[in-house]
Amino acid sequence: MAETRTPSMLEVFNDNFNRAARYLKAPADLLKYIRTCQSIYSIKFPVRLRGEVKIFHAYRAEHSHHRVPTKGGIRFALDVNLDEVEALAALMTLKCAIVNVPFGGAKGAIALDPRAYEVEELERITRRYTVELVHKNFIGPAVDVPAPDMGTGEREMAWIADTYIMLHPNELNSMACVTGKPVGQGGIRGRTEATGRGVQYALREFFRHPDLVQATQLSGDLAGKRIAVQGFGNVGSHFARLIQAEDGAMIVGLSERDGTIYAPDGLDVKAVLQWRETTGSIKNFPDATTLDNAKACLELDCDILVPAALQNQITPENARRIKAPLIAEAANGPTTSEADAILRECGKVIIPDIYANAGGVTVSYFEWVKNLSHMRFGLMEKRIGIRNQRQMITGIETVTDRAFPMPIREEMLHGVDEIELVNSGLEETMVESFQEIVEIMHQNQTPDLRTAAFVCGLHKVVVAYQALGIWP
Ligand code: NAD
């Protein structure tokens, strides 16, 4: 039997793009231009490590400049290639358009396994990569603003910010050259968990649409829903923790690269995090069954499957064995086009990546705005809000001659902090965008949410280019 080749991420992106393009009244040449990645920087740079010079291959792709700066994460992964970076940058363009974040899409990567290096080695590699980006004008608050992605986090973002600031001592807004920084280094509260929280808000909104819920043969809300999560990194772990703690959902399965754990009555996510901290793995977690196969997580008996690890995980090979009627794509590109068609044929509903994982870039946008304003959100209005609330409480108590119960009084007088403003802005963004996608799906009779989301994003990019024209 002939072996089937797994398509590249760019091929999958182009398939989805072409499917959505049929629903748009846009000139073919413009669509062709929009599909093209506009700037690509591929570098090989040296770093002296362990007594020898090591060469690293790295990339930055800016997919679309219809809005600037461009924006997108930086990935550290051994097998990353240009095709993958271009596809991820293209997804970012549409993602930003869908959630009305005023950026073009970009993505960067260094081909390395971060687990193979000491912290100070990673720091030298990250700083050298930043210098390369500066020299070719592929980073800057008004140019291109990176963020974390697979294999990177706030530590790497702090190194990038510091390197950029050292090279631009007189630039007032240099802190806004990168997002996802630690809070003490110009970051914003809520960014670290934003992508996972965004998936949580997306699922909450899904369950407010009875026609969509009916198609999955599920009912009610997230309480008691059985969820399996592939990938227990930044996105997967925060998602699992939040949806269990705040929505009463059950996490029945979790996987990491070395295996899957399964407990039909639910796993205690905080305890699993603690277990991994102590043992270095989620495997053999007490009261759970351990399976050595990491991909087994995708096929578990559950209501909702959340791939939150890598691309190309759901393929024609395993698509028919997926039991969950609802899939929320927290990872970028977890489903190949062929698998997508099989899942649709089997009646599965998919909340697509370009919408589902947009929480990260949404809160990155808030961080960028915070850096440009040089002030924490909520600082100016908090005390006024508390004073107004106190006056209202006093007024109501005077008129009714009854006192508010203490817990209610305390909650009303708490005031709004940065984290509450961030989560409120994120929730509003995820709810509003989902409603827009559903409306497009109904209006255009698109067969699924993915096509509708692509139509939603593409339409906004087309309108922007038509308004901009071509100069000179
Ligand atoms: P991460 O590096 O923090 O975590 C990835 C996790 O996946 C790790 O725990 C790793 O051990 C695990 N993993 C690797 N191979 C696996 C396998 N075969 N099976 C199961 N688990 C495996 O990365 P992240 O930031 O959580 O990103 C995960 C996905 O979400 C990526 O596709 C990324 O592009 C996407 N994403 C991330 C963000 C963000 O803000 N970090 C935003 C949008 C999208």
Image (spheres, rainbow, N blue to C red):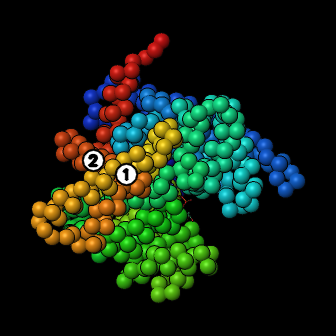
Q: Position of residue 18 (x, y in %)?
A: 36, 38
Q: Position of residue 384 (x, y in %)?
A: 33, 49
Of the numbered discs 2 and 1, the one sitting upstream in the chain is 1
Residue identifier under label 2: 432
- Disc 2 on helix, strand or loop? helix
Say what amino acid the circle numbered 2 marks. Glu
The residue at 63%/41% (across/down) is 59
Binning the other alpha carbons within 10 Å of mark 2 as few (below 14), some (14 to 19) or many (20 upward) gives: some
Q: Position of residue 38 (x, y in %)?
A: 52, 29
Query: Comparing marks 2 and 1, which lies closer to the viewer?
Result: 1
Binning the other alpha carbons within 10 Å of mark 1 as few (below 14), some (14 to 19) or many (20 upward) gives: some
The label number, if any, that marks residue 81 in the structure image: none
Please indicate whether residue 315 sits to the left or right of residue 258 in the image.
left
Please indicate whether residue 410 sits to the left or right of residue 308 in the image.
left
Outermost top residue: 472
The residue at 66%/39% (across/down) is 165
The residue at 40%/67% (across/down) is 242
Q: In the figure, 232 relative to 90: above or below?
A: below
Residue identifier under label 1: 382
Q: Position of residue 53 (x, y in %)?
A: 84, 47
Q: In the figure, 75 relative to 67: above or below?
A: below
Q: Are marks 2 and 1 in contact (CB under 8 Å)?
A: no
* Count of numbered circles in the view: 2
Judging depth in this view, the residue of 243 and 400 nearest the camera is 400
- Disc 1 on helix, strand or loop? helix
Judging depth in this view, the residue of 34 and 50 nearest the camera is 50
Q: In the figure, 80 relative to 373: above or below?
A: below
Say what amino acid the circle numbered 1 marks. Lys
